[in-house]
Amino acid sequence: MFGLDMQLLMDVLQFGISVFVLFLLASYLLFNPVRKMLKDRQEGIKKNIEDANADKESAAALKEQYEAKLKGIDKEAEQILSEARQKALRNEAKIIDEAKEEAARIIERAGDEAELEKKRAMDEVKQEMIAVASMMAAKVVAASIDTKIQDTLVDETLKEMGDSTWLS
């Protein structure tokens, strides 16, 4: 159908070489930069994945540290609460002891005041008894002594005391 002549073969060969050179040129100018871009992108994605994995591992390690710290904080909080309870119990015992001491002092002071009050009452009773006895003695003496005997007793008492004592 068509004749294969030398010119056609040369044209085909020239066309093949042109396509090959064009392919090499396109490969060098277009495909290589695209391949490089794809390779760089692939490496970037790979790096991002590695970074993400490293970040994930780091986050897991941090999570474990924080969980350990949280457990430690729970223990520390429990210890602080325990110490606070013990301190409160000590303060409670101290306050109770101080209150008991204060109550003992108040009771002792009340006992002392009661004793003083008792002594005062006894002194008042004695004074009143003396006053009553004096009044009774005065009435008895007044009733049994006449005025002559009374004047004699007063004179004797004045002489015993002396004039200087009576006048001063």
Image: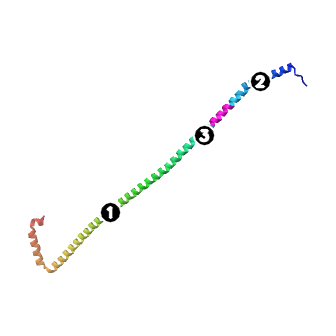
Which of the pair 54/105 is nearer the observer?
Answer: 54
Q: Residues within 10 Å of mark 2 (few under 14, many from 20)?
A: few
Q: Looking at numbered disc 1 in the image, what kind of residue is underneath it?
A: Ala
At which x and y percent is residue 134?
19, 74
Labelled disc at residue 53: 3
Labelled disc at residue 104: 1
Name above or below for residue 147 compared with residue 5. Answer: below
Point out the residue furthest to the right here: 1
Confirm whether the magenta stretch covers residue 45.
yes
At which x and y percent is residue 168?
13, 64
Q: Mark 2 points at which residue?
A: 20
Q: Looking at numbered disc 3 in the image, what kind of residue is underneath it?
A: Asn
In the rendered structure, which segment of residues is drawn in magenta? Answer: 38-48
Q: Nearer the viewer, mark 3 or mark 2?
A: 2
Q: Looking at numbered disc 2 in the image, what kind of residue is underneath it?
A: Phe
Confirm whether the magenta stretch covers residue 27.
no
At which x and y percent is residue 14?
81, 20
| Quadrant housing the N terminus | top right
Real-space CA distance between mark 2 and mark 1, rounded to the nearest whole angstrom: 119 Å
Which of the pair 70/24 is nearer the observer?
Answer: 24
At which x and y percent is residue 65?
52, 44
Q: Nearer the viewer, mark 1 or mark 3?
A: 3
Q: Which of marks 2 and 1 is in front?
A: 2
- Which secondary structure lies at badge 2? helix
* Quadrant in the rendering for residue 84: bottom left
* Quadrant in the rendering for residue 96: bottom left
- In the drawing, does residue 84 fall left or right of residue 25? left
